[in-house]
Image: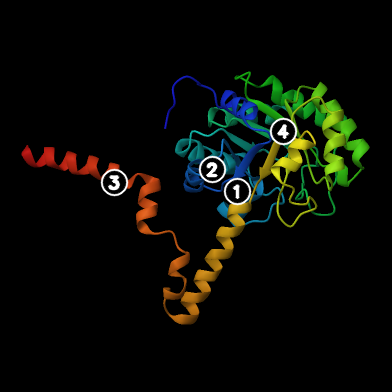
Amino acid sequence: MFHAGISSAGERFRRALEHERPLQIVGVINAYTAMLAEKSGFRALYLSGAGVANASHGLPDLGMTSLNDVLEDVRRITAASYLPLLVDADTGWGEALGIERTTREMIRAGAAGIHLEDQVAAKRCGHRPGKELVSAAEMCDRIKAAVDAKSDPAFVVMARTDAASVEGLPAAIERAQAYRESGADMIFAEALTSLDEYKAFCQAVDAPVLANLTEFGKTPLFTASELASRGVRLALYPLSAFRAMSAAALEVFDAIRKDGTQRAVIGKMQTRAELYEYLDYHAYEAKLDKLFAVKRKL
């Protein structure tokens, strides 16, 4: 789908940020879930590195997927939905030249922005123990490399800091300030644990701040209004639908295996009619009918 008037995904993301406080960004794992999110009224989408690893490759989120693995999912999602897509770029897949390539390829694939994190290359989930950080200076170099590679000035380079749970909140704020000075457009404050922490972080950092509301992690599931009142500008729900989809799939598989039929769980399923509606199936079918009608006349 193409909408005239705004040519850049980065511009669309920045415009969405101005229309909603906080901007709710919902995680999608494939093209179809992106379409569902758009139908639900969201203004922005997110592709999680964990989502790519878990859903597309059956791997844990431990830095085992490549740039090309992520780009494949980015292209599919941006082809299916006009909503701007923020992409988890982990630590950037390399040093300066690698990060420059990552930025260029993400823009080419239609992403609205990426976030880079300050963990070591052998990264871990932001809500797990054992995280190790690079120096603030090394992270600033990562940010500068990404910013320098932007062919679209509106493309968002977001800096994620995991320092709050490793070095403490003051150190995380200090890092975020340095990342902002190095050119980061926005800041991803990972694994904060209270609204007071978000308030202090947002007051100290002169940039839009993102709160990651991943389930079963260190951050409580604050409401959008609670976050807005503390100055948070972006609220991220990275894997909410994926977790629900996975639980539902297990329930269906177990029922079919146990009962020998899917009758007990049919009420939990999206109907064929609903699927066709979201895909605009009948419009495609009508084109085929018209084409075959012309061929029959010939």
Q: Amino acid at mark 4?
A: Arg
Q: Where does label 3 land, which residue?
A: 282
Q: Where does label 4 land, which residue?
A: 233
Q: Where does label 2 land, which residue?
A: 73
Residue drawn at x 87%, y 29% is: 204
Q: Amino acid at mark 2?
A: Asp
Relative to 104, is 215 on the left or the right? right
Residue drawn at x 35%, y 55% is: 273
Residues at marks 2 and 3 touching, judged by CB atoms closer than 8 Å? no
Is residue 117 at all visible to an observer of this figure? no
Which quadrant does the N terminus fall into?
Answer: top left
Residue 52 got which mark? 1
Which of the two discs, 4 and 3, labels the residue nearer the N terminus? 4
- Considering depth in this image, is 17 or 1 the residue closer to the camera? 17
CA separation, marks 4 and 2? 26 Å
Tag 2's secondary structure? Answer: helix
Q: Residues within 10 Å of mark 3 (few under 14, many from 20)?
A: few
User: Viewer-nearest of labels 1 and 3?
Assistant: 3
